[in-house]
Image (spheres, coloured by chain):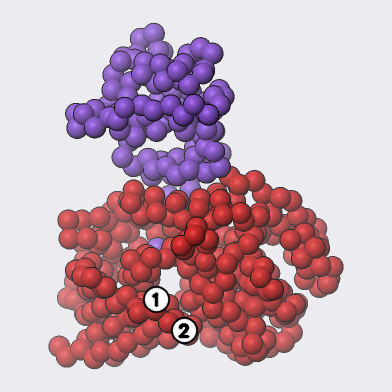
Amino acid sequence: MNATSTTFLVGPVRVTLDATLPAFERRVDEQLQIFKTSWDASPYEVRLRVQSVPAPAVAARGTYLTCSRMDIDTTPRGLYATTLCGASAQFEEKWDGGESWTIGFPADQIDTPAIDQLEDLVGLALVSGWRAAGWTPVHGAAVTRGGTCLLLCAMSGGGKSTLTAALVRDGWQTLGDDKLLLRVGPGGLPEVAALLHSFNLHPKTREWFPEVGDLELQPRYSAWTVKRKVYADDVWPGRTAQRARPTHIIRVRRDLERVPIRIAPLSAEEMFRTLIGQIAIPKDSQVAAAAMRTASRAVRSGLRGLDVVIGEDAYQDPATLAALTAAL
Amino acid sequence: MNLNLNESPTQEMLSLRPDVVATGLDAGAVLLDLDTKYFYALNASGWALVQLFEAAASFDEARAFALACGAPDGDGVDLFLSRLYDYGLFETAADDAVAATPTLEIDSNFEWLAPTVERQAEPLQQVIVSAFDPSIPLAE
């Protein structure tokens, strides 16, 4: 089979994709072309070969990590992952400055919704590449203004995107509402970097931010959610940032009892647990220790922490954000 | 499992299990058991004791270390170690770990307090959304 080769810059990683079928190329392109931030450092290379295979792969057991649609094992060859439809990713080789993976996708599943499971396997290779490039992937949001940078931490559906959008509308710059990279640089100072400048907003968000338009008309962020992808520059031009030094960890929680906003300080241990709770930690002591070291060094660098509980309709009241900014 | 120190082999050499990882935080530390996904917060004295078991140590050695650091007696140390033991954080030390045990050094400025360990109420999720997103998977 002839493969076509395409490259994508995904933060500090350059992905070279060799896909044996246009369907694979389309699906991976859809996933990776949204990463539009620019990086000045030489990228770490991740080579991905995606090919069809005649039968489902032998299922991994999750000895490294268990995800909702993917199990990952540690094997003598390196990480091995399989998804629900029998697609697989095998780590192949590492060299100075890069690594390679082979993804096999069952031929009889290509023209089915299962093609979306490529997203999980490609995501695993990206996470591996980001870590190898010296960064810790953080499932969080960040905004910055005038030397202050807030790391907004919450589980999926916990309100990161909505608070990010509210702050950006209020004049802050976003580094992303979902995917960030974190590292502790020379001098022990933490640094957060943007991967993509977009919001993943629920269609009902329009009730609070009419400027985002009719979100039902926008493409879905992922096959797994009703949220829509909205680019910050399309709605609030110029409100993006590339790098920042975090000054605060904000633990965000929703309150269904419609309390406008409640703010309380976080201890160092609570900040650590909040931050580490946003990092996928596999059963690999080296990876886990590195993530914990990054989180603890970030906390020890002098970050302040706030627990912020926000009511469902709080964004209709300008006093909500005023209370938050006053507490910083 | 409750450890009765009168019946336990207090001279047995033990190590932290290899899938228990630690990092310093404030004056103490946080341990994460990658098997159970529970976090444990240690104060400074607790962290000083646990570091003995990063190579290998016995409970008797740990008690002696605490007394040399200024602990008034060994009771608090016994209670602390028995809790770690109950949490399953130790294993019998390998021979090479015993051989590699460093000489214990005591910082003369160290102020001894009763060692404490606090287990986080909820463990990290065993099943998460993706290799990037540690959220709880939602029903689809």
Q: Position of residue A72 (x, y in %)?
A: 30, 59
**What quarter of the picture does the C terminus of chain A occupy?**
bottom right
Q: Position of residue A104 (x, y in %)?
A: 23, 74
- Check the image and report above or below for B92 versus A28: above
Q: Quadrant of residue A128?
A: bottom left
Q: Quadrant of residue B35?
A: top left
Structural distance between the alpha carbons of marks 2 and 1: 9 Å
Q: Which residue is mark 1?
A: A12
Q: Is residue B26 left or right of residue A87?
A: right
Q: Earlier in the sequence, mark 2 or mark 1?
A: 1
Q: Colour of chain A?
A: red
**Label 1: element kind:** loop
Q: Dot 1: few (<14), some (14–19), or many (≥20) neighbours within 10 Å?
A: many
- Dot 2 amino acid type: Ser
Q: Position of residue A203 (x, y in %)?
A: 65, 79
- Check the image and report above or below for A320 versus A262: below
Residue pictured at 57% horizontal, 75% vertical: A175
Q: Position of residue A139 (x, y in %)?
A: 51, 64
The disc numbered 2 marks a residue on which chain? Answer: A
**Label 2: element kind:** loop
Q: Is residue A241 left or right of residue B20?
A: right
Q: Which residue is mark 2?
A: A38
- Dot 1 amino acid type: Pro
Q: How many marks?
A: 2
Q: Is residue B127 visible?
A: no
The disc numbered 1 marks a residue on which chain? Answer: A
Q: Dot 2: few (<14), some (14–19), or many (≥20) neighbours within 10 Å?
A: some
- Check the image and report above or below for A194 versus A22: above
- Check the image and report above or below for A134 versus A62: below
Q: Is residue A184 visible?
A: yes
Residue found at the very far front of the displayed protein: B108
